[in-house]
């Protein structure tokens, strides 16, 4: 197959993956090249944190190296030669990260793992430089790592998070879904976010949720209390019952303050 043919085939696979990944209930026939491709959510599943990988500097590492107390992880599964979908997804992640007040390496980390065992640390380093430059956030180089690894590590990780992909030998490309995984500080799957564009507020609330409130302001935690994640929308939706409870508690607090103040004034007058 010519280079143009391979690029066209990959574009077709990637475009189909964008549409097919979140729509698990569709009845249209799935293209043969995408059979079995998608994401099976495994919320609260523990990641195999000791799997051997190689970072962009050629050093041996593990996913566990990027986790610490109160410090969640954003995991992306891509491959660095991908001419379409991975680029769109990572560009969308960069755009969302720009909308956060937090910086990778400070409040959370990002790990991008190649699903192609043939790719090297040299290629990972080139991609890392490019996306960090696009992000333009001083200090982010300490918190966003691009990893490569052997097939055994890749297979174990993708199975753990339910990320199913397929290699097309004729096109020499991978068909896969577009999704990022938010991981808790102790290495459990907390949330999946789908697509090639990510709302910064949804990403920030996902990180607050994954950290169990260890990052974010009191207001962020209050907002998270009043909202719940809606998988159909891929964002946090207002939780009416929680809002009513919060409003009730606020009403009691306000009334208590008013009545207490009135009582203190009356008592002062009586004492006088």
Image (cartoon, helix red, strand yellow):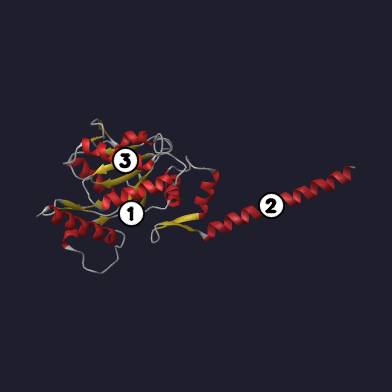
Give the Cα distance between marks 1 and 2.
44 Å
Task: Give the camera-side residue of 19 and 166.
Answer: 19
Residue 118 placement (x, y as % from top left) = 16, 41
Residue hosting label 1: 196
Residue positioned 88% across, 46% down in the render: 270
Question: In which quadrant will I find the C terminus?
Answer: top right
Q: Are marks 1 and 2 in contact (CB under 8 Å)?
A: no
Residue hosting label 2: 254
156 w.r.t. 169: above or below: above
> Quick check: 228 left or right of 261?
left
> Quick check: 239 left or right of 72?
right
Q: Is residue 189 visible?
A: no
Label 2 SS? helix
Question: In which quadrant will I find the N terminus?
Answer: bottom left
Residue 156 placement (x, y as % from top left) = 22, 44
Circle number at residue 151 = none
Residue hosting label 3: 111
186 w.r.t. 87: above or below: above
Q: Which tag is nearer the camera, tag 1 or tag 2?
A: 1
Residue 21 placement (x, y as % from top left) = 28, 58
């Amino acid at each position: 197959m010519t280079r143009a043919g391979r690029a066209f085939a990959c574009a077709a696979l990637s475009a189909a993956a964008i549409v097919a990944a979140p729509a698990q209930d569709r009845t249209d026939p799935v293209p043969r090249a995408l059979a079995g491709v998608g994401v099976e959510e495994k919320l609260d599943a523990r990641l195999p944190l000791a799997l051997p990988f190689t970072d962009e500097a050629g050093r041996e590492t593990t996913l566990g190296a990027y986790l610490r107390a109160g410090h969640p992880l954003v995991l992306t599964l891509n491959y660095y030669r991908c001419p379409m979908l991975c680029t769109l997804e990572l560009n969308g992640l960069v755009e969302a990260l720009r909308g956060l007040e937090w910086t990778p390496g400070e409040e959370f980390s990002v790990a991008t793992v190649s699903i192609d065992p043939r790719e090297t640390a040299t290629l990972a380093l080139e991609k890392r430089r490019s996306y960090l430059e696009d992000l333009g956030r001083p200090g982010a180089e300490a918190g966003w790592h691009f990893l490569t690894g052997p097939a055994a590590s890749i297979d174990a990780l993708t199975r753990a998070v339910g990320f199913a992909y397929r290699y097309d030998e004729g096109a020499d490309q991978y068909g896969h879904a577009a999704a990022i995984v938010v991981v808790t500080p102790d290495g459990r799957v907390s949330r999946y976010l789908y697509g090639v564009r990510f709302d910064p507020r949804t990403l920030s609330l996902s990180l607050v949720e994954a950290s169990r409130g260890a990052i974010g302001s009191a207001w962020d935690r209050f907002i998270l209390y009043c909202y719940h994640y809606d998988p159909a929308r891929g964002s946090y939706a207002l939780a009416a019952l929680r809002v009513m409870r919060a409003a009730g508690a606020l009403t009691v607090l306000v009334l208590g303050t008013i009545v207490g103040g009135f009582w203190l004034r009356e008592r002062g007058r009586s004492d006088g």
